[in-house]
């Protein structure tokens, strides 16, 4: 059975090239870019230089750290707060360097890199393009990834994290694995009305993280109200067409199709949807 992997996919309004070049510099990576002009026949002149698809990879590697594209001119983007690109690394010095570089011109640093109960270093910020990042390094729990540095997807919910993650697990089927930790389990001083909210959850298949999620602390001092984004996707990849078709159909329950799961010029099958929790997903079976 082919494994399933997910990566963060970002949308910009004409800033994809600039953003990915900035991320490549910060992450010691390199960019791969395809413009709309080179991909779309008779592309309008005003869209020729927009990015159809781009990614940041480590030199000599194929696995993307982050992917992105420009939207059509007419599409309006909503920069929400219900997601983060999670940069994970076993190399603390690399993580510190990346955090400092991505802090350049950042809109905000919500948490400086510091030691926390689950990691040697953790921090978060919103970069100068409005993209939210988490940094997790020197993890104190067992990590099965053979890579030194990788990215994951983190989604925030307003009290529906458990329901959403259980829904995703059911959609993925066996042999997926789901773990939870509530806010009450994490701290004895948690207010009663927040104890059953999810502090952290992780859904994985074959030791590969598909998505992580948590509830916000809305209603508590400093709580954050969810504003759902349209500039972010969880991009799921597999070589197993049958498995991906089944997953697309299951995830669509109560959701809305953006593009049916069908053959395209770049993929055996590709499609995207917004699930019933307002999270956007892409599904891609590469040629």
Image (cartoon, grey):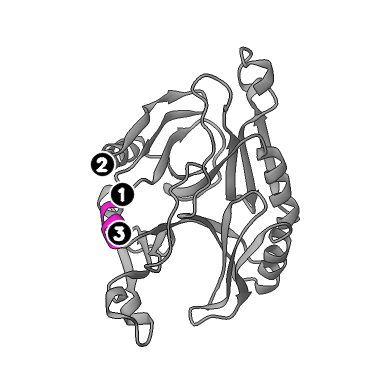
Position of 108 compared to 144: left or right?
left
Q: Nearer the viewer, residue 103 or 272?
A: 272
Q: Position of residue 100 (x, y in %)?
A: 27, 37
Pinpoint residue 16: horizontal percent, then vertical percent: 32, 60
Q: Which mark is residue 27?
A: 1
Q: Nearer the viewer, mark 3 or mark 1?
A: 3
Residue placed at 73% from the left, 49% from the top?
167
27 to the left or right of 211: left
Residues drawn in magenta: 16-22
Q: Where is residue 62 shown, x and y percent of the image?
A: 41, 65
- Residue 20 magenta-drawn? yes
Magenta highlight: main SS: helix
In the foreground, 161 or 123? 161
The residue singled out by tag 3 in the image is 15
Magenta run includes residue 265 = no
Disc 2 secondary structure class: helix
Q: Which mark is residue 155?
A: none
Discs 3, 1 touching: Cβ within 8 Å: no
Gap between marks 2 and 3 measured at Cα = 18 Å
Which residue is at the far top?
189
| Position of 171 relative to 221 (above/below) | below
Please report whichever mark, 2 or 3, sits nearer to the chain's N-terminal start: 3
Query: Mark 1 to mark 2: distance in Å?
Result: 8 Å
In front of the other: label 2 or label 3? Answer: 3
Q: Residue at the spot x=34%, y=58% of the render?
A: 58
Relative to 170, is 272 on the left or the right? Answer: left
Question: Residue 101: which disc?
Answer: 2
Q: Do labels 2 and 3 touch, CB within 8 Å?
A: no
Helix, strand or loop under label 3: loop
Crowd band around label 2 with a 10 angstrom C-alpha radius: few (<14), some (14–19), many (20+): some
Q: Quadrant of the N terminus?
A: bottom right
């Amino acid at each position: 059975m082919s494994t399933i992997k997910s990566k963060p996919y970002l949308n910009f309004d004409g800033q994809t090239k600039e953003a990915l070049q900035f991320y490549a510099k910060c992450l010691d990576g390199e960019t791969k870019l395809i413009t709309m002009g080179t991909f779309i026949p008779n592309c309008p002149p005003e869209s020729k230089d927009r990015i159809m698809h781009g990614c940041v990879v480590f030199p000599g590697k194929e696995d993307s750290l982050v992917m992105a594209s420009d939207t059509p001119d007419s599409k309006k983007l909503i920069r929400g707060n219900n997601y983060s690109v999670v940069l994970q690394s076993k190399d603390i010095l690399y993580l510190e360097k990346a955090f400092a570089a991505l802090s350049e011109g950042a809109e905000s640093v919500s948490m400086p890199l510091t030691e926390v109960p689950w990691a040697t270093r953790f921090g978060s910020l919103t970069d100068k393009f409005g993209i939210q990042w988490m940094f997790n390094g020197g993890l104190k729990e067992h990590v099965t990834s053979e890579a030194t540095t990788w990215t994951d997807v983190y989604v925030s919910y307003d009290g529906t994290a458990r329901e959403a993650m259980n829904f995703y697990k059911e959609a993925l089927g066996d042999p997926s694995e789901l773990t939870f930790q509530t806010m009450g389990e994490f701290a004895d001083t948690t207010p009663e009305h927040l104890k059953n909210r999810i502090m952290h959850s992780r859904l994985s298949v074959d030791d590969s993280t598909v998505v992580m999620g948590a509830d916000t602390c809305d209603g508590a001092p400093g709580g954050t109200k969810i504003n759902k984004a349209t500039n972010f996707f969880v991009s799921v990849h597999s070589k197993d067409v049958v498995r991906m078709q089944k997953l697309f159909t299951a995830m669509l329950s109560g959701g809305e199709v953006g593009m049916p799961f069908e053959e395209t010029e770049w993929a055996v099958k590709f499609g995207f949807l917004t699930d019933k929790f307002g999270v956007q997903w892409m599904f891609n079976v590469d040629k």
